[in-house]
Amino acid sequence: MKHPANYIRRIEISSLWSGHKHIVWTLRPDVNVLSGSNGAGKSTIINRMVQHLRALPSSGEITDEGIRLGVTIDFQPSDADGIRYDIIRSFDRHFVPGDKLHQITDMRVNTELDWQLYLLQRRYLDYQVNVANRIIEMLQSNDEDVRRQAATAAATKTRFQDLVDDLFSETGKKIDRRSNELSFIQYDEHLQPYLLSSGEKQMLVILLTALCEDHQPYVLFMDEPEASLHFEWQKRLITMVRDINPNAQIILTTHSPAVIMDGWEDAVTEVSDITL
């Protein structure tokens, strides 16, 4: 991808449900919450967008796969050839014995949330190396832009750690800040992230993904992220993600009013309002 976009301006899907629905959705650059009844097509719309982005070649032109999906995505700026994105799903299915993923990973990785954490560990290590390199460059440079970027990266990592510590404080868990890998301390005992509760794992996956985006423009897709999350965590979710990466465009589906209660009521779009 030579010219990644800053955000998605508009999505059009002409063949949803075998052509029975036509979707036209103009998106905000910050937060977009898709709401609707069960079976209205929220997850299908998200899935089509992600499938289209995966099918984009380096030129950014619509492929045969994109035509088959009936999806058109307009970027900002318009000459961008793609966009960075992450997708987080909330289903914590257990791997069954013999599952390929179960066979190729550590035996501690037993659920889909564990698998997402497993993949994020590598991104987290790479992110830390990048931040450390920028701090070294900052110490050797008089360039104000270099110094500002390094300071922002260091502050964001600390902000992430502070947020997680605050969220997990009731159970005595804190991030082990001396460890290069992501691990926790609970009442002086070391704790691996695979031993967290489903809600804790889910929140950790979301915030860690935002951190590893490293302040770059990204689209963060989330399909019903409120599953397993405490009411208060649901209320804080969007604001915390934007705090860690203010350049992320969030596109999520939800059934929970709590997700938008922290000032995001105007970001809600009903599926029926974008269906022609």
Image (cartoon, grey):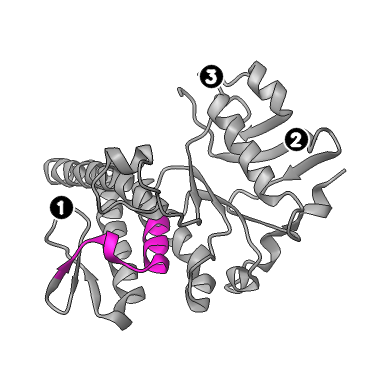
Region of the chain picked out in magenta, as a range: 190-207
Is 121 situated above or below 158? above
Q: Residue furthest front?
A: 97
The residue under the point 48% across, 49% down is 247
Residue 117 or residue 6, whichever sits in front:
117
Going from the N terminus, do you reach mark 3 or mark 2 first?
Answer: 2
Which residue position is annotated with label 2?
13
Disc 3 marks a residue whose amino acid type is Pro
Which residue position is annotated with label 3?
57
- How far from the left and from the top, in percent, is residue 27? 68, 47
- Determine whether, in the image, residue 186 is placed left or right of residue 95: left
What count of labels does the image hold?
3
Residue 180: mark in rendering: 1
Residue 231 or residue 7, whichever sits in front:
231
Q: Secondary structure at mark 1?
A: loop
- Determine whether, in the image, residue 134 is placed left or right of residue 188: right
CA gap between label 1 and label 3 equals 35 Å
Going from the N terminus, do you reach mark 1 or mark 2 first?
Answer: 2
